Image (cartoon, grey):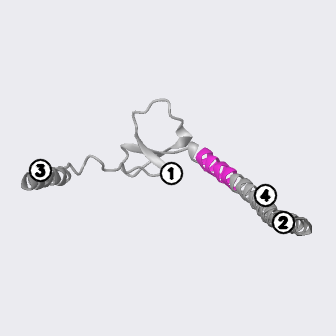
Amino acid sequence: MEKIRQIILSVVLIGACSGMAFADGTAFTPLNFSDSSYTVSESAAGAPAEKLASTSTGTTTTVNLTGNKKMQSAISELDNAQVEVRNELLNYKTKYSEADAKYNEIKNERAALKKQVKATEKRIKQLDKAKDKIRKNMM
């Protein structure tokens, strides 16, 4: 029974590894686009002339992305929002630590008062016992 289990486990492990070994390497090849510009064939109709710059081959043209500035401003806005959220988090952490300190202070004070109450109750019980003993001795 143990050998069958080991054989099945070995077959499953080999099957999983062979799947990775025979995988096609070109399936996840990234595209080679530049962040600032991309090429468009000259057959693109309706493109403004001032945005087109011909390349050395003459068959394609380079178009500067107008959305690049918008993307940069969006990234900077997100950075600013992230800074604001981090500042807000720091404020909340500060308030939490203050509340936690107050809680611990009150908790310690409560524990001290509880000890005093128990000690006082114990003393009262001792005094009651002493009174009972004195009453018994008087009789």
Q: Are marks 1 and 4 in contact (CB under 8 Å)?
A: no
Q: Which residue is mark 3?
A: 8
Q: Quadrant of residue 130?
A: bottom right
Magenta span dominant secondary structure? helix
Q: CA distance from mark 4 to mark 2?
A: 45 Å
**Residue 93 in picture, x, y percent from top left:** 72, 58
Q: What is the CA distance from the residue labelled 1 to the residue labelled 4?
A: 51 Å
Query: How far apart, in angstroms, are the residues tagged by discs 1 and 3?
Result: 53 Å
Q: In the image, is residue 71 part of the stretch drawn in magenta?
A: yes
Q: Residue at x 57, y 47 (%)?
A: 68
Dot 1 crowding, Cα within 10 Å, few <14, some 14–19, many 20+: few
Task: Please report the bounds of the magenta region as a residue range.
Answer: 69-83
In terms of depth relative to the viewer, which is nearer, 13 or 112?
112
Q: Tell which circle, 2 or 1, labels the residue nearer the N-terminal end.
A: 1
* Sequence-first tag of 1 and 3: 3
Relative to 27, 59 lies left or right: right
Q: Residues within 10 Å of mark 4 (few under 14, many from 20)?
A: few
Confirm or deny contact between disc 3 and disc 4 (CB under 8 A). Answer: no
Q: CA distance from mark 2 to mark 1?
A: 93 Å
Q: Please tell me the numbered disc located at residue 36.
A: 1
Q: Which residue carries the number 2 mark?
A: 129
Residue type beneath disc 2: Lys
Looking at the image, which residue is at 36% across and 43% down? 59
Distance (Cα) linking label 3 and label 2: 79 Å
Q: Which residue is mark 4?
A: 99
Of the residues under marks 1 and 4, which one precedes in the sequence? 1
| Kind of residue at badge 4 | Ala
Q: Nearer the viewer, mark 2 or mark 1?
A: 2
* Residue type (three-letter) at the residue carrying disc 1: Ser
Please state, as top left, top right, bottom left or bottom right, where the C terminus lies in the image: bottom right
